[in-house]
Amino acid sequence: MFIISKGVILLIMIIQFVTTVLLVFLLLGCVDASSNYSNVYLFNYKFNSSSSLYQHLTLDSNSTSTNSTSTTSSFLDSDLSKISVKVGYMALCISANDFQQCSSYVDLQSIPQLTISFFETKFSLLDIAQTFHTFIVHQRLLMASMIFTLAILIILCYLVLPICFGTLTIKRIGLLLSFTNMMLWGLGTMLQHQSVIATTKLLTGASFEVVEVGRGQRAETMTWVSFSFLIVVFLSFVMMNYAAMRNLRGANGSGKKSVIMEKV
């Protein structure tokens, strides 16, 4: 029974560790140009070449200047429909042809601004990304959930030890933290899902379908899988606390019966 109990806790600990890794990669999406990070994004947008207004778009050559000559030529030589911007929680990636560059939101001046002229109006792709990051996409819930996830992982590491003191109290704390974390990231998951849907419809409609928005499937999958794992961890703590309370009541009941037998 002892081995089975510790084995279950070890399995829950592995699930919690996987959840932690998923949340970390979700937070660090688009911080680097490697595929491990650049493919983890909430949504991406690019110009729709099939739009009737696409022919009126022109790229300002001054907005593509960087410290690298190859970077500038990559954007100038590419078709506008080949330029895309991927938006993550803490950073974004901009790509054209075979070139890709990523940057955090606090250092957007280090990458090409890509100002587009549309008749007499000018707008920047990075300004659009910055606006949605400021008013729609927030990483606070994700960071708070990561803190709770790490705390629960530490608790599980303690419970899997052969000898641990205050097990009942630790399990109650784990139950409280896992419930809070489940509700917190549940809210974050729904907000992220609705934000991406709203961004897709709003940006497509506001641009008269000149801008085409796509959802990041990998980030969405990681979000829902991590939330599902948090539910599993919470239910596991419920069962652990239920079993601990039942054993405690059984021990107290056995103690009372022995006292009665001694009196008789």
Image: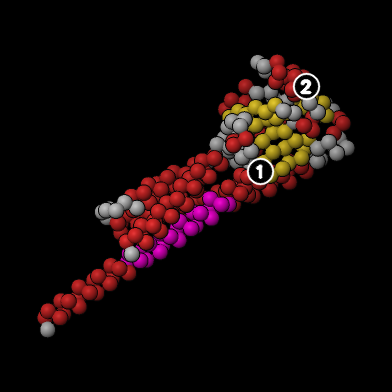
Q: Residue at x 61, y 32 (%)?
A: 34
Q: How is the image coloured?
A: secondary structure
Badge 1, how many Cα within 10 Å: few under 14, some, many 20+?
Answer: some
**Count of all numbered marks drawn on residues in the image:** 2
Say if 48 sits above or below 242 in the image.
above
- Asked whether residue 249 is in view, the answer is yes
Q: Which residue is mark 2?
A: 76
Image quadrant occupied by the N terminus: bottom left
**In magenta segment, residue 31:** no
Badge 2, how many Cα within 10 Å: few under 14, some, many 20+?
Answer: some
Q: Residue at x 42, y 45 (%)?
A: 150
Marks 1 and 2, the one that precedes in the sequence: 2
Q: Main secondary structure of the magenta part?
A: helix
In the image, farthest residue toward the bottom? 264
Expressed as whole percent of the image width and height from the top left, the position of residue 234 reads 45, 58
Expressed as whole percent of the image width and height from the top left, the position of residue 69 reads 70, 15
Residue extent of the magenta highlight:
224-245
Say if 248 sits above or below 163 in the image.
below
Expressed as whole percent of the image width and height from the top left, the position of residue 46 reads 75, 35
Q: Residue at x 28, y 70 (%)?
A: 249
Q: Please state which amino acid type lies under the numbered disc 2.
A: Leu
Q: Which residue is mark 1?
A: 216
Disc 2 secondary structure class: helix
Report, in whole angstroms, how far the alpha carbon at label 1 lies from the one at label 2: 27 Å
Expressed as whole percent of the image width and height from the top left, the position of residue 32 reads 59, 30
